[in-house]
Amino acid sequence: MSILLLILPFIAAIALLATRHLPARPIALTATLANLVVTILALSTFNGDGSFNYEVSFPWVSSAGISFRLGLDGISMLMVLLTNLLAPLIVLSSFNRQYNLENRYFGLVLLMIGALNGVFMALDGLLFYVFYELALIPIYFICAIWGGANRIQITLKFFIYTFVGSLFMLVALLAVYLKTPAVALENGLPEIAHSFAWEDLVAVQLDPATAWWVMLGFFLAFAVKMPIFPFHTWQPDTYVSAPTGGTMLLSGIMLKMGVYGVVRWMVPLAPEAMQGWAPVFLGLAVTGIVYASLIAFKQSDLKRLIAYSSIAHVGLIAAGVLSWNKAGMQGGMIQMLNHGINVVGLFFVVDLLERRIGSRSLFDMGGIARSAPKFATLFMLVLLGSIAVPLTNGFAGEFLLLNGVWNYNATLGALAGPTIILGAVYMLRAYGLAMFGETTRHTSEFADIGLREWIVLGALAGFVLVFGFFPQLILNLTDGSVNKILGAVQF
Amino acid sequence: MISLLVLFFTAVIALFAGLFKKRQWLQPLALTGTGAALGFALLDINLPSAFNERYASMLQFDTFALAFTVVALLATALIFGLSRWGFRELSDTLGDNYALFLFSLCGALCMFSFTNMVMLFLGIEILSIPLYVLAGSRRDDLRSNEAALKYFLMGAFATGILLFGIALVYGSTASFDMHRIHAVITANGHSPQMLSAGILLILIGLCFKVSAVPFHMWAPDVYTGSPTMITAFMATVVKTAGFAAFYRLFSTAFAGAGEFWEIAVAMVAGLTLVLANTTAIFQVNFKRMMAYSSISHAGYLLLAILAAGQPGAGGALLYYALVYSVATVCAFACFLLVSEQNLDETFAAFNGLSKKQPLIAATMAVAMLTLAGIPPTAGFFGKYFLFAVAFERYPWLVILAVINAAISIYYYFKVIIAMYFSAEENAYEVKIPWSIRLSLAAGLILIALLTLIPSSVYNLI
């Protein structure tokens, strides 16, 4: 099952990248839908007690303790669900644009999706690292080939920034790896191998000094990816210049790699340093939430506004997870899925507006609700989810997250709490400017959404409601794994 | 040993074929010769034969030597695949060119298999002297002449220092034999000051050969001035030979000679990494960038020398050398096609290549990603293995290397940016000769195999 999730997109990607004349759109859609079916099948027989389901393991470089090992516990399953739920929608929303060299575009998107699935399933440290970096290459090409103005400088900055972060993670992984007990190999070679297996790495007891450095290394990688203040500077520019499909992949799925990395790798591998580092990390995360919310206020470019709001939302997820208690952790889980749904919906709306109006500036918009009521309704639903109104999907997550941060430290909780109100204000202000008021010359002939757009936005709005009414669906999925990981890693 | 003989006789036949103007025979002949040698080397790794015993205590084709022989022969075979195109403007010296390549390769084989320091010295000379000639093989090109002269003067200087070092080590231990030297050192029967001085001088001589900072000055000019085929050979086979000899000597003869030389090597490695990478950023000429890139890779490879003798260090060196060689040959092959179309050696020559020549562009992109060490390419595993063996004792150096790996992205990606994202289009459409296609395909397959099953090479030694 887990292998299938990798192989399907990779095969489709290679087929599309190697040829010029295959029908790219049907292949991409079929591959992502097939992956969704596999995910649902995997969910149907999933055992949520915190053990690894569908585990596969092949030796890869056995003399260096590296194996190709995949498995899914509740947390991984949730991330895989997020990836494969959004993937068909991202592909479908790309159909609205005409890209030149379409085969390459969809090939790279599929490659990215395969790599993301790999990141969330890898149970071998080096394999995780390889997938983590592999995800970076297609998104780099997507942004740099099909992006907007200044794309080359912006994407190179993005690439080098994230690559530097990940390299520090490699060093940190290496440091822990060398501390695992060495085993003599059975086939008679004189080498002694350490192990990259997740359990072996977790079992290592680090001395405080090493743990301090190891955690810093991991944090640099994940903080750049999420991004956490002050490592966020690549993000707004990259989101704005990337093509919509790329922005959706980045914001909807890729930045969850950072949060997932914290939960799966950073804290379990170096819990000894958590006591010292957690206040710093949480402080940065909360600073980022406030800072990004304030900046988002001043934006008139809708895409940039959502980019900053995304920093705030992910900052809250990070803060909740790093507070390392049940409420924060479960809130982080539920919110990772929901933020993915909401942010992809919002970027889809931006793309739709940009295609119709030719501008992303809020001042060029206005009065759209009158000519496009269906669009206005669906946009409203997604937006409500994003500002965490009760009975939408954002509510339960943000509530639990704030609860978790509050339990860790009341001051930080009090600082982070009001940003939800801030978020509501700037998002509703944007909605008001765009949808109500006088029509401008750009929006006077605004066509309501077509069938394909309706499917994408309708599906996303549907998720907003479903997960808003039944957050328990997600909580049940991750409950066992979260309990297990919280129980195993104490400091 | 059979490989060495096969190569030598192929070279002699190539000389005669050139003499009798059998131009069209030369490439098949050279390819068959290297192919046969490669076959024998591979056979010997799997089924150790009596031919690999020590010859007069001079040469010993053990697994280490055979494995590196395979690396050098693979790289040379790939380069010979390009030679019909790369050598096409040579007229009457074609036979000599092939022969010199092969003779130089014989020297490399001696450097892989020596057990006696005299043989090391001879190997280096056999390797170098044909190269001095080859570097200047474009007789009417001023830069080629400059390259030959510079390479010759610097090379002679370096060998002089090396020879002086060997003499001092002999003075201290009364032997040229590696195992004997090791035995004397462990039994404390030597004079330590003289040995230290000797080892340091040998170190300097070898650093010249592998172009490590501060002994790298010759490399950029020589790489840029030499014909591209020769540059590819120097960047791959010569570098591999230098490092193999370096490793062989320091893991056998000087193991246990104290750690004083490690500090020197660590400093050299750090300097090499920082200087080469920061200088490469500013290059506009592709060959010059590759020269600095090759210097920077020497910095990474020195990590293996620092870990000499530890489990995994030899394997890491071998794996890195193979990956680096294959990727470098692929890069130079693409460059050869592109630059000669445009008469342009800068990055601008690659502008818009992905639209005109998607296959060449894709190969070049893979080569650049491999050299930059970006997962999941084989280059990443190469870097990883080196970092892993050096980390325990030199964590600061590994962190420095990691930062430099990040810097290197900037200049490797210049090529990718020109090929894929540039709006201009400079690249001509050319019909690519089948032999080059074959070489490139073989290179790509090798990189893919090395990515999928790194252990097949890494576990060899």
Image (cartoon, coloured by chain):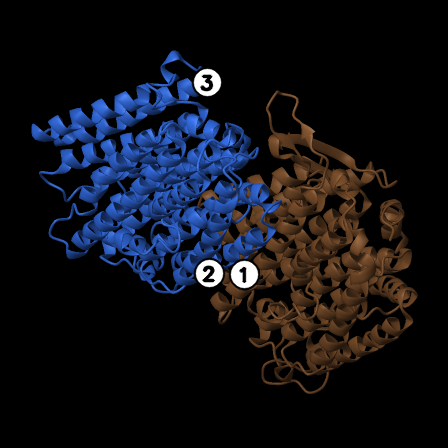
Chain colours: A brown, B blue
Q: Which residue is mark 1?
A: A160
User: The residue tagged with tag 3: helix, strand or loop?
Assistant: helix
Left or right of A247? Residue B52 is left
Mark 2, Cα crowd under 10 Å, few <14 / some 14-19 / many 20+, is some
Q: Which residue is mark 2?
A: B410
From this view, report whether residue B390 is shown above or below residue B22: below
Place of residue B364 in the rendered image (x, y in percent of width and height, measured from the top left): 39, 48
Mark 3, Cα crowd under 10 Å, few <14 / some 14-19 / many 20+, is few
Q: Amino acid at mark 1?
A: Ile
Q: Are marks 3 and 2 on the same chain?
A: yes
Mark 1, Cα crowd under 10 Å, few <14 / some 14-19 / many 20+, is some
Ranked by sequence position, the earlier of labels 3 and 2 is: 3
Q: Amino acid at mark 2?
A: Tyr
From this view, report whether residue A163 is shown above or below residue A442: above
Place of residue B451 in the rendered image (x, y in percent of width and height, measured from the top left): 52, 37
Q: Residue at x 20, y 35 (%)?
A: B100
Q: Amino acid at mark 3?
A: Asn
Does residue B228 appear in this view? no
Residue A181 location, quadrant: top right
Marks 2,1: beta carbons within 8 A: yes
Q: Nearer the viewer, residue A17 or A97?
A: A17
Mark 3–mark 2 distance (CA, rounded to whole Å): 41 Å
Marks 1,3: beta carbons within 8 A: no
User: The residue tagged with tag 1: helix, strand or loop?
Assistant: helix
